């Protein structure tokens, strides 16, 4: 990870600084930054990180390279913002389900069923951006960032399951790490199935079947 991407941009793209001179004199942006960011999300979501070029981004966002660099930084810095925005919006359903449901079983059942709806939603890329962006990724920093997010999710799943073991909602012999990893594997698999054309109804059946592997309540 680059500790200060903004500093790297200042030192590595002097020509872009020159091109952005008019902006430094106070020229307002001629585009909607939120709309441009939304288009960047959809582009990375559809194509993955490695297969998305700066040209793909500027074409989708409707801006030129100097505007992209001035407003968002380089491709990797833009992707970091895209990732944060995606997790807080399109991808927030999982954490919300676990936070709002009274038990781990109810939370994960809701999460998987909502994943079926979200991953196969019409009118936007299918599957999960965090999962798909890692496909064929050869940029070590991005690969590590995505791996850390996936592993953090598994750790969060295990913590939620352990809490129910502690309260007696789940049996004491429940293997929380294994159950967490199993649930994550189903979630990730559903993302790929959605990209391969599985419908919401087909994914919902997968979600329901996955929950039968959970141990019975104590």
Image: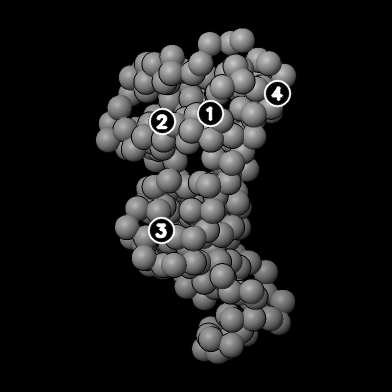
The quadrant of the picture occupied by the C terminus is top right
At x 65%, y 18%, the residue is 103
Q: Few, some or many C-alpha atoms within 10 Å of disc 3 (few <14, some 14-19, many ≥20)?
A: many
**Where is residue 194 drawn, in percent x and y?**
34, 32
Q: Secondary structure at mark 3?
A: loop
* Distance CA(mark 3)–CA(mark 1): 34 Å
Cα–Cα span, label 4 and label 1 = 12 Å
> What's the mark number on residue 166?
4
First reached walking from the N terminus: tag 1 or tag 2: 1
Structural crowding at the residue carrying mark 4, measured as other residues with C-alpha within 10 Å and reported as few (<14), some (14–19) or many (≥20): few
Of callouts 3 and 1, the N-terminal one: 3
User: Which is more toward the observer, 200 or 191?
Assistant: 191
Q: Secondary structure at mark 1?
A: loop
Would you name the residue on which mark 2 appears? 186
Is mark 3 in CB contact (under 8 Å) with mark 2? no
Q: CA distance from mark 1 to mark 2?
A: 17 Å
Residue placed under numbered mark 1 in the picture: 175
Give the residue pinned by disc 3.
49
Q: Residue furthest front?
A: 173
Residue 145 - label:
none
């Amino acid at each position: 990870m680059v500790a200060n991407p903004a500093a790297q941009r200042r030192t590595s793209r002097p020509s872009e600084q020159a091109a952005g001179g008019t902006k430094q004199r106070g020229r307002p942006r001629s585009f909607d930054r939120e709309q441009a960011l939304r288009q960047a999300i959809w582009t990375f979501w559809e194509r993955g990180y490695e297969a998305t070029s700066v040209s793909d981004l500027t074409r989708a966002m409707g801006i030129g390279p100097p505007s992209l660099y001035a407003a968002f930084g380089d491709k990797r810095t833009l992707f970091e913002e895209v990732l944060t925005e995606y997790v807080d919006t399109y991808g927030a359903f999982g954490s919300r389900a676990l936070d709002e449901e009274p038990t781990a079983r109810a939370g994960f059942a809701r999460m998987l069923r909502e994943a079926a709806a979200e991953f196969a939603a019409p009118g936007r890329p299918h599957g999960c951006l965090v999962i798909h962006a890692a496909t064929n990724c050869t940029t070590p920093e991005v690969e590590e960032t995505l791996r850390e997010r996936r592993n953090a999710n598994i750790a969060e799943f295990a913590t939620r399951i352990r809490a129910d073991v502690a309260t007696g909602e789940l049996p004491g012999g429940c293997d929380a790490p294994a159950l967490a990893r199993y649930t994550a594997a189903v979630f990730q698999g559903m993302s790929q199935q959605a990209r391969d054309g599985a419908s919401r109804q087909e994914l919902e059946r997968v979600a329901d079947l996955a929950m039968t592997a959970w141990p019975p309540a104590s």
